[in-house]
Image (cartoon, rainbow, N blue to C red):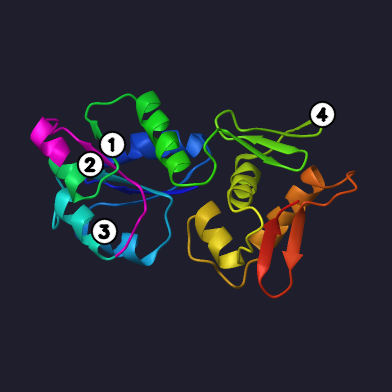
């Protein structure tokens, strides 16, 4: 899952980014509202973490503008302004949740997971595809009775495929969501990690879940 942080305090960015990456999220960040507006409109994110007091364009204005442009990405506002009036203003502008500073990372993570669940068809922490089970809270993966150990990138790729079950995902989309940079056509990193996944998920099982769609990309399905 890919998350955008729009925040002008580098210490807060580092704190959130480090914690979220440890939970296998891919994290990008920008330092002002104008850059945040550009990123939100032109790139795909699963969640936006947004400070209210930003240079160039404040969080209320930014939220209102991207909603007017049809961006439906969930927004969690992070701010030291925790009056009822500010919360109402943020929610009325189009934010989905509001977390006052200072906050614990555990609460941020819980709210992040709740918003991501709300935005998808998966309403629990468990994703099941045939006999494959993925626990998105504990990051445990099993197929049948066999527990599967994965690296953070392997897990991030598997969860992204699983949350988009039966949908063909291009290499570009996969690279942006899992690695967080524009896809370089000269690298085969996506194909390499698909091979890693196949070895762990499909090898030794009659039913193969990870499929190649020639000329289009990859998908996972029953």
Badge 3 local density, few (<14 within 10 Å), some, or many (20+)?
Answer: some
The kind of secondary structure element at disc 4 is loop
Q: Earlier in the sequence, mark 4 or mark 3?
A: 3
**Residue 145 - label:** 4
Q: Is residue 77 left or right of residue 26?
A: left
Task: Please provide the residue range marked out in magenta.
Answer: 70-88
User: Residue sitting at 66 percent across and 67 percent down?
Assistant: 217
Relative to 196, residue 35 above or below: below
**Residue 149 - label:** none
Relative to 153, residue 168 above or below: below
Q: Earlier in the sequence, mark 4 or mark 1?
A: 1
Q: Earlier in the sequence, mark 3 or mark 1?
A: 1
Residue identified by numbered label 1: 12
Gap in Å between the C-alphas at discs 2 and 1?
6 Å
Give how far across and how far down residue 135 sits, in percent. 62, 32
Task: Mark yes or no: residue 58 visible.
Answer: no
Residue identified by numbered label 3: 67
Residue identified by numbered label 2: 9
Gap in Å between the C-alphas at discs 2 and 4?
46 Å
Q: Within the magenta stretch, is there residue 79?
A: yes
């Amino acid at each position: 899952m890919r998350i955008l942080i729009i925040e002008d305090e580098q210490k807060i960015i580092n704190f959130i980014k480090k914690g979220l990456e440890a939970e296998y999220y891919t994290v990008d960040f920008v330092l002002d509202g104008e850059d945040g507006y550009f990123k939100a409109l032109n790139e795909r994110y699963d969640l936006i973490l947004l400070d209210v007091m930003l240079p160039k364009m404040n969080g209320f204005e930014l939220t209102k503008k991207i909603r007017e442009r049809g961006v439906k990405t969930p927004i969690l506002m992070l701010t030291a302004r925790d009056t009822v009036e500010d919360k109402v203003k943020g929610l009325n502008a189009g934010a989905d949740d509001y977390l006052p500073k200072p906050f614990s990372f555990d609460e941020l993570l819980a709210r992040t997971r709740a918003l991501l669940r709300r935005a998808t068809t998966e309403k629990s922490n468990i994703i099941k595809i045939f006999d494959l089970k993925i626990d998105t809270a504990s990051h445990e993966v099993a197929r049948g009775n066999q527990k599967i150990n994965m690296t953070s990138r392997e897990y991030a790729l598997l969860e992204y495929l699983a949350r988009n079950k039966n949908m063909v995902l291009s290499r570009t989309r996969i690279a942006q969501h899992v690695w967080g940079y524009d896809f370089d056509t000269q690298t085969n990193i996506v194909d390499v990690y698909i091979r890693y996944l196949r070895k762990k998920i499909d090898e030794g099982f009659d039913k193969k879940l990870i499929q190649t769609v020639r000329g289009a990309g990859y998908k996972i399905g029953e």
